[in-house]
Image (cartoon, grey):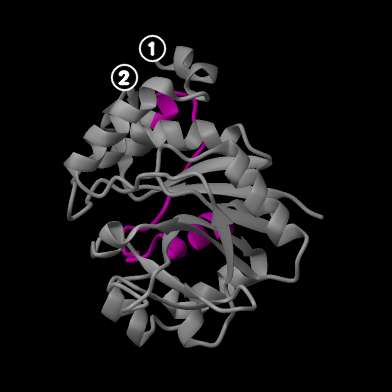
Amino acid sequence: MGKTLGVVPVRMESSRFPGKPLQLIHGIPMLAHCYERALLSDCDAVYISTPNMEIVDWCKQMNISCVLTGSHHERATDRAEETLRILEKQNNIFEHIVLVQGDEPQVSPNEIDSIIHTIKNTNASVVNTVIQVDSIEAESSDVVKAIIGQDNNVLIFSRSKIPFNGEKFYRQMGMIAFSNRALKEYSALTPSYHEELESIDMMRFLDNDISIIAHESFSHVIGVDRPKDLEKVISLFAGDKFLSSYSDKYT
């Protein structure tokens, strides 16, 4: 079925938490947790994708695969697409790409395997992980909510609380799988109205009538948007079952 590429896009200039990719979680930079856990999955190759030489230099020191991309990208998805093109010029060809966000360090290799299985065994071009959250979490504008149709297609994403009078809420997670063709099509499209209005990558697909399949996860992962989120993640990592498989490399 072709090879699968894992891409971990990171940049130092986060508006809400500058420098967060290199923030330490149990002595290991956050981006390294994301990278190592993707390596434990069924991805055939994993690359850090960044516009920052500071991160590139760190990756070289740690013998971590890394691609330097342009600094102009507003969306992690566009950065992943440039990474794919750079690798293809080196004759590294991948049929599917999994975007593993560099600020979701609790990501489970098993969940990555699950989304790979979904996109390889369906006709889907794009598969986005979602998880059910409570109404309190749904109130936060940091949390991207999704409405999912009966056919399991995502109908819309929003930072507002949707559905307004709902009893069940779904959060978009940063792990997204693409076919090679769909990822290239994304970057060929003009940034869309709702994408820019909501600051949500995947609205570019929905605004252009390109379907996104929802892949439900039951593993709650905290996205590190702000320093307070990092504190929560650090406390939760004490019992993490994957940490011991790579911690010796960094400590």
Q: Is residue 246 left or right of residue 17?
A: right
For the point 31% across and 41% down, the residue is 53
Q: Which mark is residue 251?
A: 1
Percent across and percent down for residue 49 are 44, 48
Residue 95 in view, yes or no:
no
| Magenta-colored span | 59-85
Would you place residue 179 above or below residue 27 in this image? below
For the point 66% across and 49% down, the residue is 114
Q: Which mark is residue 27?
A: 2
State which quadrant residue 238 falls in: top left
Q: The N terminus appears in which quarter of the rendering?
A: bottom right
Viewer-proximal residue, 57 or 170? 170
Q: Residue furthest front?
A: 167
Q: Earlier in the sequence, mark 2 or mark 1?
A: 2
For the point 61% across and 56% down, the residue is 97
- Residue type for callout 1: Thr
Percent across and percent down for residue 113 are 66, 44
Query: How far apart are the alpha carbons under marks 2 and 1?
Result: 7 Å
Label 2–label 1 contact, CB within 8 A: yes
Estimate how packed mark 2 is, as few (under 14), some (14 to 19) or many (20 or more) residues with alpha carbons within 10 Å.
few
Question: Quick one: SS at disc 1?
Answer: loop
Viewer-proximal residue, 97 or 176? 176
Q: The C terminus appears in which quarter of the rendering?
A: top left
